[in-house]
Amino acid sequence: MPEHRPIYCSFFLFDSITRLYDPDESARYLDHIRALVDLGYSGFELHTVRSPEFESAFPDYSDEVAAYARFRQTLDDAGFGDVALATNTGATPDLDPSSDDPAVREAASTYLASRVDVAAALGAEIMMGPVVIPYGAFVHSAPNGTPVWSDGLQDELSRRYHNAAPVLEHVGRYAETKNVKIAIEPITHWETPGPNTLAQLIDFLALVPSTQVGVVIDSAHEILDGAGPDVFAEQVEFLAAAGRLHYAQASPPDRGDLTSSWLPWEPLFTPVLAHYRGPVAIEIFNAIPDFAAGLRLSRRKYWIPGVDAPADGPSAYEAASGSLETLRARFRSLDQPLISQATAEATAGATGGLDPVASGRN
Ligand code: XLS
Ligand code: ZN
C-alpha cells in the first residue's frame, strides 16, 4: 500500500553537513527530527562528508564513527529508535577512487569503507551519493587548464571509471558485511562531470560485480540529463532485475519543495514504484549559504524554526509538510493501477487462478 512506503527527508533542508562536533547543532537536529516525524516522515538522510571541523574534532575515522554511533544512541534514547537513517556522501579530489594515482585510490578506498562504517553506526542501510567521481570536480586539461567537455570528457571519464571500478568492488564487498547498500547517484552535468546519466552509470556498474553497489535515482537529475521516458522505464526495469535499484529521491529541477514545482510524476515514478519497494527521500536544498552560490539558488530561504526569525514565506517545516502531502497524493494516484493489478492477482490466486497463462492451464 502506498501509505506504507517509508518517506525520508534529506537534511539538506537544514544544513550542508552533519555538525556532530557542535552540541547545540546536534540538539537542534533532534528538534527537526521530532517535528518532521510528527508530520509523517519515517526517516532522514544525513550528509556524512568530512569538513575541516571534522579533521580537528575527530582526527581519526574511528573517532568520527564513534560520534555517529553516539548520535544514533541519542536518537534511540529520545524515543526515535524506529526512525530510519540513510547517508549521503561523496568522493573528494584527495579521496578519489577514479584517480590515476594508486595512492589516492587507496586513500579513497579506506575513506569510503569508513563511510560504510559511519552508515552502519547510524543503523543506515543505504549510503548514497557521488562516490565514483568527486562532486563538482570538473575536468581541465594540463598544462593550461582548458576545460574538457563532450568527447574529450567522456574519453577521460572512461579511463577513470576503469580506475574506480576495483575500488568500488572492494568497498561493495565490505559493505555487504555491514548490511549497507551503496547507491551511486547520476548527477546533472550542471553540477558535476559524471556520471550524469543512468546509461553512463549502467556501463560503469558492468565493471563492478558486487550488486551491493547500485543506483539511486534522483528525479531532478533524471529530468535534466536523462534519456526520456521510454528508455528510463527500461533502465529502471533492468536495474531492478539486476538487484541494483537501491534508492530513490524525489526532487524537482529547482531543488526546492515539491508542491510549487514542475515534476513529471507519471513517467518518472510509475516505473520506480512498480519495481522498487524501498524508501523514497524528499530532497530539498534550502538556500543556506553553502548551497546558494553552488546551486545558484535565487529563491528565498525556507526559514528554519529555532534558527531563523519567522519570515513571510514558508518555513522549512511547512516546505517539508507540503512536499510530503504532494508526494503522498501523487504516489496514491500512480499506485492505483498497481494496487488493482495486485488485487486481481491475489483474487486469481485465491480462486485457483483465473488467468490461464499465469495458472499454466493454457
Ligand atoms: C544531489 C545529491 C548530493 C549532493 C552532493 O542531488 O543528492 O549527493 O549534491 O553531495
Ligand atoms: Zn540527490
Image (spheres, helix red, strand yellow):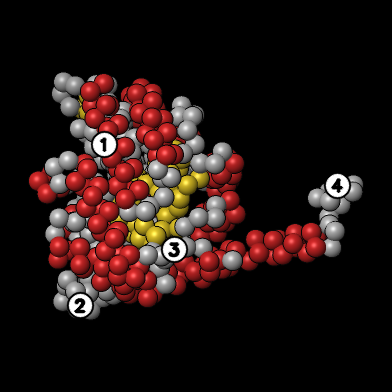
Nearest to N terminus: mark 2 or mark 1:
1
Would you name the residue on which mark 2 appears? Answer: 311
Question: Which residue is pictured at 21% across the width and 41% down the height?
Answer: 61
Would you name the residue on which mark 3 appears? Answer: 7
Is ligand 1 less than 8 Å from the beta carbon at label 2? no
Please identify, in this view, whether the residue under mark 4 or under mark 2 is nearer the observer. Answer: 4
315 or 361, nearer to the observer: 361
Q: Report the side of 22 relative to 211 (left or right).
A: left
As helix, strand or loop, the secondary structure at mark 3 comes to strand
Q: What percent of the width, then of the height, locates residue 59?
A: 13, 42
Q: Report the side of 346 relative to 185 (left or right).
A: right
Q: What percent of the width, then of the height, locates residue 271?
A: 57, 52
Which of the image's four quarters has the N terminus?
Answer: bottom right
Find residue 360 and name its label: 4
Is ligand 2 less than 8 Å from the beta carbon at label 3? no
Q: Which amino acid does the dot numbered 2 rest on? A: Ala
Q: Is the residue under label 2 in contact with that under label 4 (CB below 8 Å)?
A: no
Give the distance between the C-alpha atoms of the residues marked 4 and 2, in whole angstroms.
Answer: 64 Å
Would you name the residue on which mark 1 appears? Answer: 111
Q: Is the residue under label 1 in contact with that under label 4 (CB below 8 Å)?
A: no
Mark 1: give few (<14), some (14-19) or many (20+) Cα within 10 Å: many
Question: Which residue is pictured at 24% across the width and 30% down the height?
Answer: 107
